[in-house]
Image (cartoon, rainbow, N blue to C red):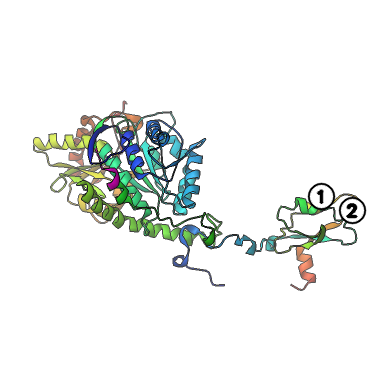
Amino acid sequence: MKSVTSKTVMALTGNDAVAEAMRQINPDVVAAYPITPQTELMHKFADFVADGDVKTEFVLVESEHSAMSAAVGASAAGSRVVTATSANGLALMWEVLYIAAGTRCPIVMADVNRALSAPINIHCDHSDSMGARDAGWIHLHSESSQEAYDNMVQAVRIAEDRSVMLPVMVCLDGFILSHTLEPVEILDDKTVRDFIGEFKPVHNLLDTDKAITFGPLDFHDYYFEHKMPQVVAMKNAFKVIDDVAREFEKISGRKYTHVEGYLTDDAERVVVLLGSTCGTAKMVVDDLRAKGEKVGMLKVRTFRPFPYKDVRRALSGARAVAVLDRSHSFGAQGGPVSLEVRSALYHHASVPLKNYIYGLGGRDVSGDQIVQAFEELKAVAASGKSSDELGFLGVRE
Amino acid sequence: MKKKGWKDLAVGGRIDVAGNACEYETGSWRTFRPIRDEAKCNHCLRCWIYCPDSAIQVEDGKVVGIDLDHCKGCGICAEVCPPKVQAIKMVQEAELKAKEGK
């Protein structure tokens, strides 16, 4: 679409939807490198650039490390910057992710979730974004392409809020969302433009009247102090994410917050999930509810900062909870989300938990796998104790 | 100078002044100091060319001194001073400090 003058529902892939959001955001600079399954997102955006639909300075770099480095440089020079990557591309820019967060660059990046090598796998799992969970970026996960579009637009406002000033990663499941068609409502160009507003940079290396030194050295006497504002910014992000969502609801009619409980209010057994699998889980919950089982699903949208209070509130009433991770932290008791959930509940709610790993390397997630988790939770609920055994759904023995 | 607490820092570890790295006296790291013999020096400027810290001070094409605030005592100047000239000697900083009563 060259321009959208009124809210329009279009058949779009997740990549298309994110590219559309980027067109409407019209960033000053995009520096990117292709990697499956992000590639078509950048192709689409490159078309917009070639056709003159955006004013973006599009920098075609030689690697993802360069992509994020150029993004930081551009952000430091006062530009609104957006980029996108996946999997090993994200891994390649790993050191610069920390730099972007540490220097407080409000970069927005779509991460089209794909499994990290080895073995080489181009399909969906969350190992890529989870591998970067300590870098200081805000992480928002999308259940659908609609959410991916909505999250991109909101991400700009979240990142640029003066009390936050942190880079934001919008995650969408590779192939499952990025390459499948879905009806997505695209807001009109002007509404998005007004919503994100004009970029008011905090860093502006090009302002020679207010000379700054960007990204200097610290010794042991200051590094620790320089990390504290990042802690505060992440804390502030809880409120900002909600405030931006409230404003976004006014222009879109769609509600967003940190978590979404699906029939969790009176649920005895709950599964916790991120991303597109939440859609599958909702169907499973409906099917089991029709059979009289009191089950529910908790979708986590904001992974960083981790909404421990919301998770506590949503899960405290359950008799057993299964946290399903689409990535593993090898050597830990469970995947990243399970560790966060356990930490949130520890000493605050005595809800028995069982951790599961599912869907690695794009392993198809059938409803049966989620039913299995709900089934096994019956025993967990009966025992009243958390399980030490890590479950694996959908893997061949 | 009292060190700042984290609440008083500029955003993103920024320094809101440009080019103030020169205020940091890296010369304090020195364990060997270059001593130049003015009589032997023929002002070929090889030491000035090779010094990694731009610490050789030159005026009107002549070496006039060494910036001890920034000379780290790496000894490259002594190394590149032509063999027939050998105008620079590296001397233990501790020895010199003791003599200077520091």
The label shown at residue B80 is 1
Q: What secondary structure is marked by label 1?
A: helix
Distance from disc 2 to disc 1, alpha carbons, whole Å, reads 10 Å
Residue A90: image quadrant is top left
How many residues crowd mark 1 within 10 Å: few (<14), some (14–19), many (20+)? some
Q: What secondary structure is marked by label 2?
A: loop
The answer to whether A11 appears left or right of B41 in the picture is left
Q: Chain of mark 2?
A: B
Question: Farthest residue in the bottom direction?
Answer: B101
Tell me which label, 2 or 1, sits earlier in the chain: 1
Q: Chain of mark 1?
A: B
Residue nearest the observer in this picture, A61 or A54:
A54
Residue at which label 2 appears: B85
From this view, report whether residue A1 is shown above or below residue A237: above
Q: Residue A252, position in %: x, y?
A: 22, 46
Q: Which span is picked out in magenta?
A: A185-190
Q: Amino acid at mark 1?
A: Val
From this view, report whether residue A117 is shown above or below residue A250: above
Residue A175: image quadrant is top left
Q: Residue A339, position in %: x, y?
A: 33, 47
Question: Which quadrant holds the C terminus of chain A?
Answer: top left
Residue visible at 35% across and 49% down? A156
The answer to whether A235 appears left or right of B67 in the picture is left
Residue visible at 26% across and 54% down? A242
Q: Amino acid at mark 2?
A: Val
Whether residue A27 appears in magenta in the rendering, the answer is no
How many residues crowd mark 2 within 10 Å: few (<14), some (14–19), many (20+)? few
